[in-house]
Image (cartoon, helix red, strand yellow):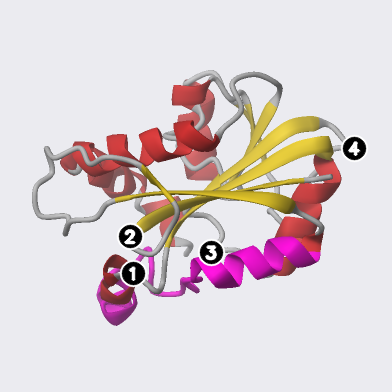
Amino acid sequence: MDIFETEVERYERWFENHPGAYQSEVAAVRAALPSSGRGLEIGTGTGRFSIPFGIVDGVEPAAAMRRVAEAHGLKVLNAKAEDLPFPDGTFDFALMVTTICFVDDADLTCREAWRVLKPGGQLVVGLVDSDSELGRRYEARKAENPFYRNARFFSVSELTEIMVNAGFGNFRYHQTLFQPLGNPEATEPVEEGFGRGGFVVVSGRRP
């Protein structure tokens, strides 16, 4: 059984136990997202990253996660990132947060995001950078974590190349989580660039 179907409470508990890390990630995403327009979250989960930004539309293949998100008023369709059930050019921006490591095909995922974006639309991807200390720790402990056991962690450079091949350009980077996740109350700053922070937000535009 899919862990995202059976362990929703455990998933939610991570955010409750690490409010500082969660708020730091939200701040990094906020620095990258456009201030207006219709958005789509790909891999909505329970809505932890849709709700702060007023994103109503989403896709999520795990029914248990969808139910929680829908209870928050989100419109979440049962679909995968590689096959988005929307016409071409529907959205002004698309958001994925710690989703790219779980998709079956990252190249197709980014091409699908490009397709459903309007010209000039923006794809914003938050990920644990595999080249960071946090990413190396996650990779080393994958077997101990049921959520990340089958994850494929990407470096920022790898993701950027995938997004370039999908047609995106005009990249911006924001990073946070510079310290180990030992203090759940600590909210960390957001800096431009990548290479120091464990959580990086990569933003690219469809021409």
Question: What residue sits 33% from the left and 60% below the top?
Answer: 198
Q: Residues within 10 Å of mark 1 (few under 14, many from 20)?
A: many
CB contact under 8 Å: marks 4 and 2: no
Residue 99: tell me if it is visible: yes
Pair 2/3: label in front: 2
117 to 195, vertically: above or below: above
Q: CA distance from mark 4 to mark 2?
A: 35 Å
Between residues 59 and 32, which one lies in front from this camera angle?
A: 32
Region rendered in magenta: 138-165
Mark 4, residue position: 87
CB contact under 8 Å: marks 2 and 1: yes
CB contact under 8 Å: marks 1 and 4: no
N-term-proximal mark, 1 vs 4: 4
Pair 1/4: label in front: 1
What SS does tag 4 mark?
A: loop
Question: What residue sits 38% from the left and 64% below the top?
Answer: 195
Q: Residue 44, labelled with which disc? A: none
What SS does tag 3 mark?
A: loop
What SS does tag 1 mark?
A: loop
**Kind of residue at disc 2:** Gly
Question: What residue sits 47% from the left and 33% below the top?
Answer: 31
Q: Residues within 10 Å of mark 2 (few under 14, many from 20)?
A: many
Membership of 30 in magenta stretch: no
Membership of 139 in magenta stretch: yes
**Kind of residue at disc 3:** Phe
N-term-proximal mark, 4 vs 2: 4
N-term-proximal mark, 2 vs 3: 3
Mark 2, residue position: 198
Mark 1, residue position: 132
Mark 3, residue position: 102
